[in-house]
Amino acid sequence: QTRLDRHTLDTDALMKRAVQALCVASYFPWGAAGSRSAITTCTSGIIAGRTDLQSSSTLKLKHTSFASAARRSSLLAFAPPLPSGKSNQRGFATEKTMSSSSTDIQQIKNRVALLQLPVTSDKSQNIQTAKDYIQKAYEAGAQLCVLPEIWNSPYATSAFAEYAEVLPEVGDSLLDGDKANNWGLSSITLMEMAKSTNMYIVGGSIPETCSSKIYNTCLIVNPSGKIVGKHRKVHLFDINVPGGIQFKESETLTGGEGATYFDVEGGDDDDDESGFGRIGVGICYDIRFPEYALLLTQMRKCKILIYPGAFNLTTGPAHWELLQRARAVDGQCFVLTASPARMPPPPPEDDGKAKYPHYSAWGHSTVISPWGEVVATCDEKPGMVVADLEMDKVDEMRMGIPTMSQKRHDIYRLVEGDNAKE
């Protein structure tokens, strides 16, 4: 009887946590209110309050047991924001239902949000879309959100120069008056949103102009609006897959020269075991290079690797998830990826009329556990994936299978290059 009671209590506690997370998806108040509705709709694959399932991003629960301690992830998808002044014709929750005052927002410890934005050729529209999605991540209780690669520009080498901006450096903030006047609107938006939402923002990537060169650059902003990391894509995407895709970033871009990581500061009640800890950052093609990931996880002790990326319809279905799982198992860490949403190609009669060539992103923004499991993912449509990371699983994995302390340095060795950051 004692065993049964203990099991019942554990199960109740797990279900209560799952219900709280699911209430985010249905925009019910925090807690157990509406829990049965939330569980029922999520189990049947429907997000409460949303009736047009063909228009929203589809969630994939690869592991459905809420009672499994290793799989306690909360998931959420929402429809892309509507342009200002347009009515909600698709049957999604109304603006009144989805909005919350700042006093109603409760950030959930170790909750992350991956923002799969629809990207257009209209830069101002892309910036507004990013703001809307970041706000939704905040309303979902995230402590950290991730934007996709090249979210303010079409993904075309010929477009990067036009959309490139002067970006701030590590340590800069909005208080740096004269310097801030030179920065582009995309970076200022990230800094303002991080401060207003009290979130860490891993800003996907945008084209950066610096000293007559163009970089594919990710800014990391802390909750005070300060730049705490800046990653320039190290490995440029120069490929030619026969019968597939040809792309050459080096026609326009210059590769970065260092590894990037940052530390997430915890609250007063946080400790190293329960917070995010140290996070490493790469961009898209960087994920194909295990040496870079091992540098971050083994020499810099990162517990999470984040890769904003825009895989295509050739490499995406073959390698996107595979590479994420490989880097997670190699580094015994969480891996997070955020992709742009897949936008429909122009109709045949308009093909060739656009200023820049169309690029079809694979989508499927994903969270992978240190065990190599898919914790949360979505399809190719615009949406957001939310997951609560159980950071103690990183230490459990590293202690249970201690590969980091079992290296044969007499046979092989990981060595930092001259440009590796201290």
Image (tube, helix red, strand yellow):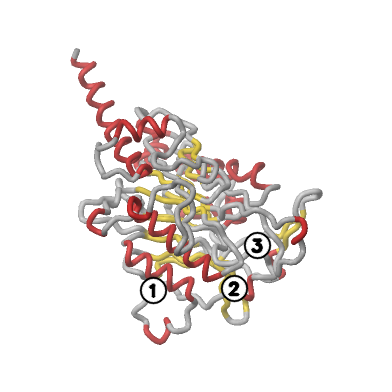
In the picture as drawn, the residue positioned furthest to the bottom comes out as 178
C-alpha distance separating marks 1 and 3: 26 Å
State which quarter of the image contains the C terminus.
Answer: bottom left
Residue 413 in percent (x, y) is at 56, 50
Residue 211, above or below 27: below
Residue 367, above or below 102: above
The residue type indicated by label 3 comes to: Leu
Residue 157, above or below 2: below
Q: Residues within 10 Å of mark 2 (few under 14, many from 20)?
A: many
User: Looking at the image, can residue 135 be seen?
Assistant: yes
Could you say whether the residue bearing mark 3 is in a helix, strand or loop?
loop
Q: Residues within 10 Å of mark 1 (few under 14, many from 20)?
A: few
In the rendering, which numbered label is found on residue 163?
2
Q: Which comes sooner in the sequence, label 1 or label 2?
A: 2
Dots 2 and 3: beta carbons under 8 Å? Answer: no
The residue type indicated by label 2 comes to: Tyr
- Frontmost of labels 2 and 3 is 2
C-alpha distance separating marks 2 and 3: 18 Å
Mark 3 = which residue? 236
Dots 1 and 2: beta carbons under 8 Å? Answer: no
- Asked whether 76 or 12 is in front, the reply is 76
**Residue at position x 81%, y 50% in the image:** 242
Q: Residues within 10 Å of mark 3 (few under 14, many from 20)?
A: many
**Residue at position x 55%, y 53% in the image:** 339
Could you say whether the residue bearing mark 2 is in a helix, strand or loop?
helix
- Asked whether 83 or 80 is in front, the reply is 83
State which quarter of the image contains the N terminus.
Answer: top left
Q: Which comes sooner in the sequence, label 2 or label 3?
A: 2
Mark 1 = which residue? 171
Residue 56 in percent (x, y) is at 50, 45
In the picture as drawn, the residue positioned furthest to the right comes out as 242
